[in-house]
Amino acid sequence: MIGHQLPSAAPVTKATFLRAALLRAALGLPLVAALFFYNIYYSHPASPSFPVEVRVEAGDSFATVTRKLREQQVVTNGIFFSLWARLHGLEKKIHQGLYRFDANAAPWEVLERLVSGKGIFHSVTIPEGLTVKEIADLLDKMQIAKREKFLAVAADPSLLTALGLGDRGLEGYLFPSTYHFTPAMPERDIIVAMAEQFRRSSQPLLAKKSPATAQLSFHDLLTLASIVEKETGVEAERGLVAAVFHNRLKRQMPLQSDPTVIYGLKNFTGNLTKKDLRDDNPYNTYRIGALPPGPICNPSLSSIKAVLQPADVPYLYFVSKNDGTHAFSETLEAHNHAVKTYQPVREPARSQAKKALASHR
C-alpha cells in the first residue's frame, strides 16, 4: 500500500561495532597464528633456482638480510620471518658470511643457520713453522685473504696493542692449526682468530716456568721455540736441539743458528754463504751472543714443550746428517769431525766460515 513505512533497522552503536570487531579478531587470531607457525615450521619455497647463495655483509640490518633472502626465494614471507626472529631476540645475532642453500629449507632452519654462522667455509691448515709472510702467501693462494692487506693488518699498531703484543709483532703468535674461514671474513678477523687460538693453546704452557727456564721471559721462550722448530722436524730431536741452545745461552755462547740468519736476510737466495754469516742484522746469531729480538716463525706445541723441558745433555753443537736427523757433539773438536763426516761438500766454504766465527769462544 502506497505510503506504508517499513520497520527501520536498529541503529549500530559503538558498543555493537566493538563487539563485532572483537568477535572477528577472536575468530581470526587462531587462523593467523596457525598460518604463522605453518609458514615458519613447514613451508618450503618451491624455487627451481636452488642452490642459491646469499652473502651477509658486515653492517647489514636484519631487514636487509630478510630482503636478500626474499629476493633469492629462500623465504616466502618476510614479515613472518622477521616476526619470528624478533620474538626470539635473534635479529641482532646474525653472523656475516656467505651462505649456500642447496635445497628448500623451512624458515626456522634458515634463521638457525644465520645465527650459528653455518655458512660456506674454506678449511685451511696452517703448517707448523710458517712465518707471517708465508701464512699470508698461503691464504692469498687459497683466495681467503689478500696477501698485502693481510700483512698490512698484521703490522697495524692498534691491532697489536689490542692483542697485547705491543711492539713485539705477530711473528710466533699465530697458532699453527686447521681453521675454517669464510670467503668474506676480514683479514683482521682471521688474524684475531689465529692469535686467540695461540692464547688458548700455547700461552698456558709458556706461562709455566722451571729452573731451566727461569731466566727466560715468555717472549724469549717463544723465540727459542721458533728456532727449535726451524732446526728440526724430528720429534725425538726437539728436546736435544733445545738443550744445545739452552747450554749455549748459559755459557753466553752465540747460538749460531742458520735459520735465524736466513730470517734476518732481506734477499735470501737459497744458499747460505760466508757473506750471509757476517751480515749485520739483529737476527744473525753468529754475530750476537744472545737470542734474536723475536720469533722467526710460528712454532708448534711440540717445540714449545721442548724448550720448557730440554733434554738433560751436555751438547753444544749439532750438524745435519742429511737424512733429516742430526749428529750432536759436546766439544768443538767432535763437532768438526762430524761436519767432515756428514757435510764434506760444505767444508771448504761455509763450514770454514762458521769455524772462523766460532774461534773466539
Image (cartoon, grey):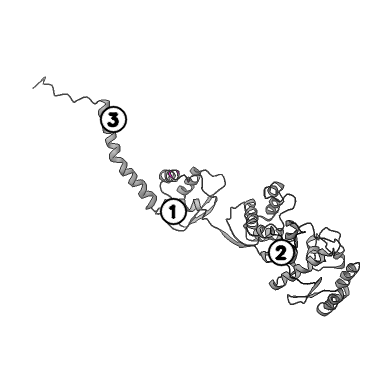
Q: Which of the two labelled residues, at mark 3 and mark 1, occupies the earlier sequence position?
A: 3
Q: Please report the bounds of the magenta region as a residue range.
A: 86-92
Whether residue 123 is situated above or below residue 336 in the rendered picture: above
User: Compared to 186, does 327 lie above or below?
Assistant: below
308, 142: nearer the viewer: 308
The residue carrying mark 1 is 109
Q: Amino acid at mark 1?
A: Glu
- Looking at the image, is 46 positioned above or below residue 3? below
Q: Which residue is mark 2?
A: 308
Residue 241 placement: quadrant: bottom right
Q: Position of residue 291 (x, y in %)?
A: 80, 60
- In the rendered image, the quadrant that contains the C terminus is bottom right
Assess disc 2: are there few (<14), some (14-19) or many (≥20) residues with their C-alpha within 10 Å of its C-alpha.
many
Q: Residue furthest bottom?
A: 341
Residues tagged 3 and 1 counted as in contact (Cβ below 8 A): no
- Where does label 3 land, which residue? 18
Q: Amino acid at mark 2?
A: Leu
Q: Position of residue 203 (x, y in %)?
A: 67, 57
